[in-house]
Image (cartoon, helix red, strand yellow):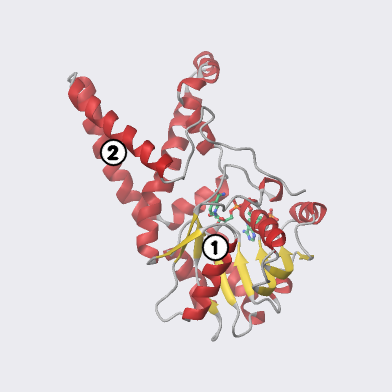
């Protein structure tokens, strides 16, 4: 147990990320009180059944009232409405952050509602799974993962240090960067892979029934890996695409050019070119394993989540 860093943590949204945060915060004693808010009756009840917090509400302002750390754990497209909702109860000195997968859009959507004296520090834990909802959460989700903070210029250094300490206590390493840079980097490492996965699984789904059953039957030959990403939450990924449009379109056009070059190499039987590319990409996989961001096991390193409940 660590000494509590915060008196009252408000988690607005209690899906995969909110629930994982609630569990690690409880396990490490990082906040004296965990106030949870969620939109639907169903999620509200489930969070209560799982015992994720100390108090529960369907009113985000109730949860945020009196909090010294507020974390928005909702789809990025919902941030503006929620920021507007909770702004009247945020008090000076509170740290307001989020976990959204895009950052420039969050700065734009939330920034105008942040009251004077509130430290607004957008964030993004680079950790997740294709599961959603409070049951999907587990306390080790952030262990040995990166969390990126994108504090606006002039943000209070002590507030950044405190939020950094919080994420480190959750098991993460912390980097800070400019929101536009974050969005470019994430467009290639996260957004594009998901879009490609959605596309390939969609193409297979469009195939006629007989072929489709064979697609499922023989999926272990490669297709299966794409289906994990393509099973990710549709609301979250719709919002990511709508809120990181420029960077995603730029990466998609580079991807299309490279794909055309690959297509040409296959058409003209350029085996050397194919071999060189496949050798280069294999070493990328090795670098990821060496960086501790994956393990080299047959199940692709997907360890079973450790539950506290
Ligand atoms: P999730 O499991 O689907 O949970 C979403 C939570 O947000 C639920 O409590 C839900 O409430 C609430 N919510 C949904 N729409 C809302 C709206 N319009 N207004 C208010 N609340 C709303 O989502 P998640 O995977 O935890 O993702 C949350 C955030 O983390 C997203 O911004 C995502 O980009 C980011 N993120 C996700 C991952 C990942 O791998 N999943 C990784 C890193 C960052 P109800 O259930 O009550 O409707």
Pointer 2 residue Cβ closer than 8 Å to ligand 1: no
Q: Where is residue 263, by image quadrant?
A: top left
Q: Residue at x 61, y 60 (%)?
A: 73
* Residue where numbered disc 2 is placed: 256
Which of 144 and 253 lies nearest the eye of the viewer? Answer: 144
* Residue where numbered disc 1 is placed: 168
Instruction: Determine the residue located farthest toward the front in the rendered image.
Output: 1
> Nearer the N terminus, badge 2 or badge 1?
1
User: Percent position (x, y) of residue 121?
Assistant: 50, 72
Asked if disc 2 and disc 1 are in contact, CB closer than 8 Å, the reply is no
Q: Where is residue 213, by image quadrant?
A: top right
Q: Is residue 183 left or right of residue 11?
A: left
Q: Mark 1 falls on what kind of element? A: helix
Which of 283 and 70 lies nearest the eye of the viewer? Answer: 283
Neighbours of disc 2 within 10 Å: few (<14), some (14-19), many (20+): few
174 relative to 269, above or below: below
Q: Mark 2 falls on what kind of element? A: helix
User: Percent position (x, y) of residue 112?
Assistant: 50, 77
Q: Residue at x 51, y 32 (%)?
A: 300
């Amino acid at each position: 147990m660590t000494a509590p860093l915060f008196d009252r943590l408000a988690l607005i949204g209690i899906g995969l990320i909110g629930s994982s945060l609630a569990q690690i915060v409880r396990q490490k004693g990082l906040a004296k009180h965990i106030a949870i808010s969620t939109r639907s009756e169903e999620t509200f009840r489930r969070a209560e059944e799982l015992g994720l917090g100390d108090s529960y509400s369907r009113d985000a302002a109730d949860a945020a009232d009196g909090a010294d750390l507020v974390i928005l754990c909702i789809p990025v497209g919902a941030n503006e409405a929620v920021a507007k909702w909770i702004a009247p109860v945020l008090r000076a000195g509170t740290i307001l952050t989020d976990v959204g997968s895009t950052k420039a859009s969050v700065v734009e959507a939330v920034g105008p509602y942040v009251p004077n004296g509130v430290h607004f520090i957008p964030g993004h834990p680079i950790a997740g799974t294709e599961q959603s909802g409070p049951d999907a959460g587990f306390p080790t989700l952030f262990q040995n993962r990166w969390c990126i903070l994108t504090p606006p210029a002039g943000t209070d250094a002590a507030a950044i240090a405190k939020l950094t300490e919080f994420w480190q206590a959750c098991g993460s390493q912390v980097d800070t960067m400019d929101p536009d840079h974050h969005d470019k980097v994430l467009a290639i490492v996260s957004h594009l892979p998901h879009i490609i996965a959605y596309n390939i699984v969609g193409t297979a789904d469009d195939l006629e029934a007989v072929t489709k059953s064979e697609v499922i039957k023989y999926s272990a030959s490669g297709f299966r890996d794409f289906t994990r990403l393509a099973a990710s939450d549709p609301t979250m990924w719709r919002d990511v695409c709508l809120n990181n449009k420029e960077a995603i379109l730029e990466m998609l056009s580079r991807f299309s050019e490279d794909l055309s070059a690959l297509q040409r190499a296959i058409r003209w039987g350029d085996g050397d070119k194919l071999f060189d590319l496949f050798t280069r990409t294999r070493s990328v996989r090795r670098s990821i394993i060496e960086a501790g961001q994956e393990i080299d096991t047959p199940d692709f390193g997907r360890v079973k989540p450790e539950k506290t409940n």
